[in-house]
Every structure is written in C-alpha cells, then in structure tokens.
Image: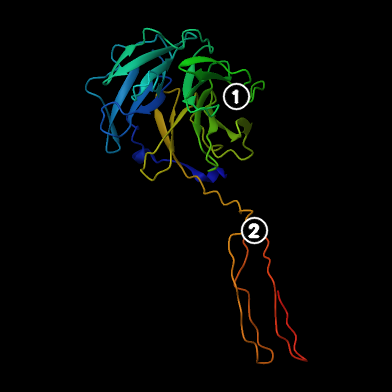
Amino acid sequence: MSSSLVTLAPASNNPFASIDIGFYAAPAFTDLDGDGDLDLVVGAYNGTLAAYRNQNGSFAAFTANPFAGIDVGAFSKPAFVDLDGDLDLDMVVGTGSHTIVAYRNTNGVFAALSANPFAGIDAGFRVNPTFVDLDGDGDLDLIAGNVHGTVLPYRNTGGSFAAFDVNPFPIQANEFHSRTSPAFVDLDSDGDLDLVVGNIQGTLLTYENRHGTFTAMADNPFASIDVGKNAAPTFFDLDGDGDLDIVVGTYYGTVLTFALVVPPDITPPDTTIVTAAFSADTAANGATNTDFVTKTAAQTISGTLSAAIVAGETVHVS
C-alpha cells in the first residue's frame, strides 16, 4: 500500500479542530447518548475524561459530562468493551500508575466495577489499552501499550485476563520507540485486523497480521504522518463512506484526522474464472479472427482448438 493513500484532512474539515484538552489527548469512540452514532471520549494528562456529542458529524462537549466524577490520577487512556455481557459497552481506562481500571456502564452511567478484571495486571507505566480478538475464540483480548515501548497481549478467558504464553507482536529494542499506543484495523483488505502503533515520536508504525503473527509492513501506509509528539491512534468512519478513517490524539492536547483509502484486494484467483466457447467461419482466404479473452496478470489461458482445414489452408492462434 502506498503512503499516498493517506491524506491529512484540511483543518476546515476536521470536526475536532476546536478540541484542546491540554496535553496527551487519547481519543476513543462509543455511543454515549444512545442515538446510534458514536460520540468522542478523550483521555488527558491530568487523568480526567472529556466527552463530545456527535451531532451529524459535528462534535460538541456534552452539557453534562458522564465522566465528570472520574479521575485516574494521570494519563487517562479510555477504551470501550462489554465486560459484563449485558450488551452495552463498559469503559476501561489505562493510567499513569501501572494500573488499568474498569467502569460498568448502566444506562449511560459509569461506575467503578467492584471486581476489577484487570486488578492483577501490570502492563507498565502509562498504560494504553485496546481490545481485539487475538486468538480467534470470539471474545476480545486486551492489548496494552506503555511508556516502555512494548505491546503486551492478555488473553480473555471467560472475563479473566492473563498474559499470552507467546507474544505475537515483534519485540525488538527500540522498534516501537516508547509510549506505544496500539490500535487495530484491516489495512490490506484481507479480512483480518492489522496492528497500528503510535509512539512518542508522533509517527505511526504498521504491522501486517499474517495468521496471528505480526510483521512490519514493507510499505507503511502512514509513513507520511507525523503529529509532532505522542501519537495515539484510533479508527472511526468520519465521512460516512463505509471505511475507517484515522483519528490521532497528540501530546499537544489536540485531535487530528486523516482520510484513509484502502484499496481492494486484487490478487488474481488461482481457480477457473470463466469458461467460454468461440467459433467462426473463415471460408474467405486470409480472414482473421482475434481473441476475446485476455489476461490482466499472471493467469493462464487454456483451451482446445479444433478446426476443419482443407488443402492449402493454415490456421494461426496467438
């Protein structure tokens, strides 16, 4: 994928242009008001959470912030997932103190879970959580970035979370830099979710999901993106075109948007895609008939030629 497929949305088109939460903006999306569209929730350096109502693509602060009483101390990073199986999305918040806290959603009111399923997890300092089904068992596992520059996976088994035996994410010195903020999206249109990692440098690194193993993409589609410092990516369909655009929180407290264009998968099939018959009367000497089947890549065209030829005539096929 070429980096030219990613474009920075003009400031006039950024629905979050007026948002400034101070430092370390960490965006996430969920439907807070039950109107069917996704609202914006932003974590911040001071440990609080700001909420912005989505009104036909425009975002404005809620009159009553549903998270007004929540303060995790520092470096709040929200994510949303159904923890209690009641079909609404609860909130999970990474903090600046090696902990992850969980809040139950009860009709739009968020309160700390009495039994925190992440109580025994230490994913490092300044935890950045997200959720994805990593092992293909139908539930969402916890993936955590941190200030140390790693990405750590925790398996969800019946609502309990424990570290995977084998970490499928590449662990190399300084590969992720530091302050890793992971997110997942299908970048190569193959039906699985690839890994995107924001970092302290303000850039985004991409890793292709190959049957559960993640390897750096040779052509990073986000190579041209640099938000200055501390990129915290998430994905959301901003323009209603059916694909997910990039929303990135920054160190400066702002939220930026990028249009994402993902090309279709045009890998040639390795099976028969057309069967056809062609016949022509070439009674006139020197008559010419041309192909009507052509190939676009490394496919093979095969067939059987039969012809009634009289003395002195020839047939050429190309």
Colour scheme employed for the rendering of this structure: rainbow
Identify the residue at image location x=66%, y=59%.
299
Residue at which label 1 appears: 176
- Residue 286 x, y percent position in the rendering: 69, 89
Q: What element carries label 1?
A: loop
Residue 139 as seen in the image, left or right of residue 281:
left
- Residue 62 x, y percent position in the rendering: 25, 24
Label 2 near label 1: C-beta < 8 Å?
A: no
Identify the residue at image location x=61%, y=79%.
279
Identify the residue at image location x=37%, y=21%.
85
Q: Which of marks 1 and 2 is in front?
A: 2
- Which quarter of the rendering shows the C terminus? bottom right
Q: Which of marks 1 and 2 is nearer the N terminus?
A: 1
- Residue 310 x, y percent position in the rendering: 74, 90
Categorize mark 1 by other alpha carbons within 10 Å: few (<14), some (14-19), many (20+): many
Identify the residue at image location x=55%, y=25%.
201
Task: Name the one closer to the observer, 42 or 140.
Answer: 140
- Residue 134 x, y percent position in the rendering: 54, 27
Residue 149 as seen in the image, left or right of residue 156:
right
Task: Tell me where residue 159 sits by quadrant.
Answer: top left
Q: Which amino acid does label 2 sit on?
A: Ala
- Which quarter of the rendering shows the N terminus? top right
Q: Which amino acid does label 1 sit on?
A: Phe
Residue at which label 2 appears: 297
Question: Disc 1 to disc 2, how far (Cα)?
Answer: 37 Å
Q: Which residue is farthest left?
A: 63
